[in-house]
Amino acid sequence: MHKVDIKRFSGKADLIDAATAHLSAVLREALAARGRASAMLSGGSSPQPIYEALAQETLAWNGVGISLVDERWVPSGAEGSNADFIQQCFAGTAAAHSFFVPLYNRDVSPEAGLAAAEQALALIAQPFDLCVLGMVLDGHTASCFPYSQGLIAALDAGNPATLAAIDASGCEVAGAHTDRITLTYSAVAASRNIVLILPSAEKLAVFKAAAKKDVLEAPVKALYALGDRLTVYALENSQ
């Protein structure tokens, strides 16, 4: 098992500050080196304060392309839209001038819309400069839910696709939104900088326990293969 870089914090404010500085530095360096930058962002409450802080950073935001690590197959304006969430985090800031590419399109399902989503995502510079992941207590990351339909293809390191369709039927934490689209593991692994946010001691414990489980039971285990290419920002207590 490869050793990952886990940065532990005793307070949430320190974690937010450190993660924000890391994300900002990645984007700033990409802009300086290539004149553009790309970031794939996860939804959820865990990274929200980091995104809100990042949006205050002075960057050439019009050179930054942003899309999603995963998305519920719902249109903008519907409950659960990660696209809406990210844009709300950036609203009213210079970050709102970034180039945003949603994953949802008008096709009837993620499977039907996969090719169009891949085509849209090609507008963002790849390999991605930054990929920000989260994890839920069932051990899923992105929309790679335990034992979900499409999971094997999504986690296949040899899969050349950037995106995969997931049917999370039967996965309790997926709620009513079981049709999902997600980055493949290969697309995550190809990213220049990969960050996992674990803002509670409980989540850190789940991540550590996943190392000894089957990857289909705890899909976040797949990230261990990234070794020190993965930076984990983890809270050691429940503050």
Image: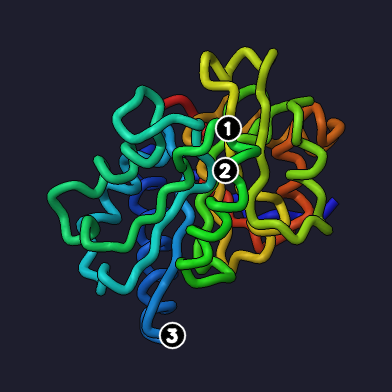
Q: Quadrant of the C terminus?
A: top left
Residue at (70, 39) in percent of width and height: 220
Do residues under tags 1 and 2 come within 8 Å of each other at their CB atoms? yes
Residue 123: tell me if it is visible.
Answer: yes
Badge number at residue 113? 2
Q: Nearer the viewer, mark 1 or mark 3?
A: 1
Which residue sits furthest left? 92
The colour scheme applied to this rendered structure is rainbow
Residue at (24, 40) in percent of width and height: 88
Up/down of 38 relative to 45, above or below: below
The mark that comes first in sequence, 1 or 3, is 3
Q: Callout 2, which amino acid?
A: Gly
Q: Is residue 196 left or right of residue 187?
A: left
Secondary structure beneath label 3: helix
Residue at (40, 55) in percent of width and height: 101
Q: Residues within 10 Å of mark 3 (few under 14, many from 20)?
A: few
Disc 3 marks which residue?
34
- Residue 221 picture location, percent across and down: 76, 40
Between the residue at mark 1 and the residue at mark 3, the CA separation in whole angstroms equals 35 Å
The mark that comes first in sequence, 3 or 2, is 3
Disc 1 marks which residue?
109
Residue at (38, 33) in percent of width and height: 75
